[in-house]
Image: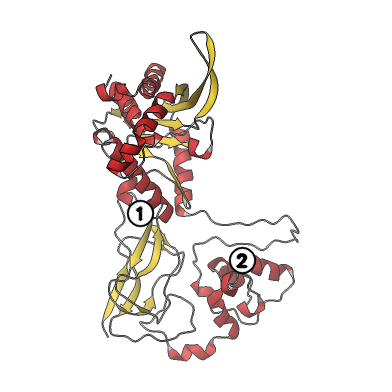
Amino acid sequence: MAIIEVKVPQLSESVAEATLLSWKKRLGEAVSADEILIEIETDKVVLEVPAPAAGVIVQLVKNDGDTVVSDEVIAKIDTEGQAQVSPLEIKAAPAPAPAPAAAPAVSTGGAKSDVAMPAAAKLMADNNLSAAQVSGTGKDGRITKGDVLGAIEAGVKPAAVQAPAAPAVAKPLPQVSAPSVNLGDRPEQRVPMSRLRARVAERLLQSQATNAILTTFNEVNMAPVMDMRKRFQEKFEKEHGVKIGFMSFFVKAAVHALKKYPILNASVDGNDIVYHGYFDIGIAVGSPRGLVVPILRNADQMTFAEIEKKIAEFGQKAKDGKLGLEELSGGTFSISNGGVFGSMLSTPIINPPQSAILGVHATKERPVVENGQIVIRPINYLAMSYDHRIIDGREAVLGLVAMKEALEDPARLLFDI
């Protein structure tokens, strides 16, 4: 027997611990080298843990939902073992291999618990119900939490013996209590926050509590940018393999303003103001797991094509949960584009330890006055929130005006004026 340990990947210095999501392999199953065994969620990203070698899983040291740290052993693989069919649910086995004698002790309900969702298994365990007492309505007959709640409301009596699948459920997850009354057509569901969502909430509260946030607004005529995109879109896409989007213009305009007013690119460290001689622009991206802000490193040195390609890459990685810790760390200024969702106006919250953030919104045709005449122009409302502790209104307003002027006359970006 040759045992190889499966360990938690090295986490970044800013991430102390992580949470195991759901094992993709069970005890006694064969795995191939580099096959994904489980995903680990940190407060920033979700990491995949591959099998270090081919073999058979002989021990799952940690359960779904357990909290782990860097380099902690979570499973063991026997590289010389043979796969075996085991009716046991995934659990932290005390021995290198499952005891064959345990199989007869598993009841029909225990075997059926293999198809119970983790939250449902937890709820069944809390109420001493076996899987045989609950009808599954999920995919492939899997038991959902709603199925368990329905069984409880229907008056199903607790089982004499607790289902053996209970140990498989993550202990750190908060207990879900059954409703005391029939909710009828007004159902409620209580689920724990993911690490990412909890971290976002924590940082937003930190920003509101520690920064003196003020927001300044301006409107931008996007016609010049739209005309330039229309004029060069075909050639640009043919040359670079990517379309010209609005975000590359906003990034370039932001960098243009930050160079003129360096305080907008600074941060507070205790009683010191740290001026950054580089421009790492965070781009807020929505993902299925929550808001993430990947960083465009040295954005001042990037071309329009490089910015567009990187933003497209960030969007796809966020969707797939593949963003790395290094892509989410740092940043000196952020841009949040609520316009993609149709937002007309908002007040963005600063992303600590940064001191300013630009909010971009939907471009709509609106009536404006030019030379005493009312005309229709494609207008975008910009909002810049800033930390008034170090940024005065003058720098904030002039910085946003510099962005406005760069967007209304894109040639300024070429000559840096």
Residue 171 higher or lower than 202, as above or below: below
Give the mark, 1 or 2, whose residue is nearer the N terminus: 1
Residue at point 76% right, 59% down?
184
Badge 2 is on which residue?
145
Q: Nearer the viewer, residue 332 or 411?
A: 411
Q: Quadrant of residue 145?
A: bottom right
Q: Amino acid at mark 1?
A: Ala
Q: x and y percent of residue 299 in the render? A: 28, 36
Task: Report the residue that reaches farthest toward the top.
Answer: 372
Q: Is residue 151 left or right of residue 252?
A: right
| Residue 126 horizontal side relative to residue 314, left or right | right
Measured from the top left, where is residue 114 in percent x and y?
Answer: 53, 77
Q: Crowdedness of circle 1 by 10 Å Cα count: few (<14), some, many (20+)?
A: few
Tell me which residue sits at (46%, 91%) in the image. Answer: 101
Residue 333 % position (x, y): 35, 33
- Quarter occupied by residue 415: top left
Comparing labels 1 and 2, the label whose residue is closer to the camera: 2
Q: Residue at x 49, y 25 (%)?
A: 379
Residue 213 visible in the current orientation: no
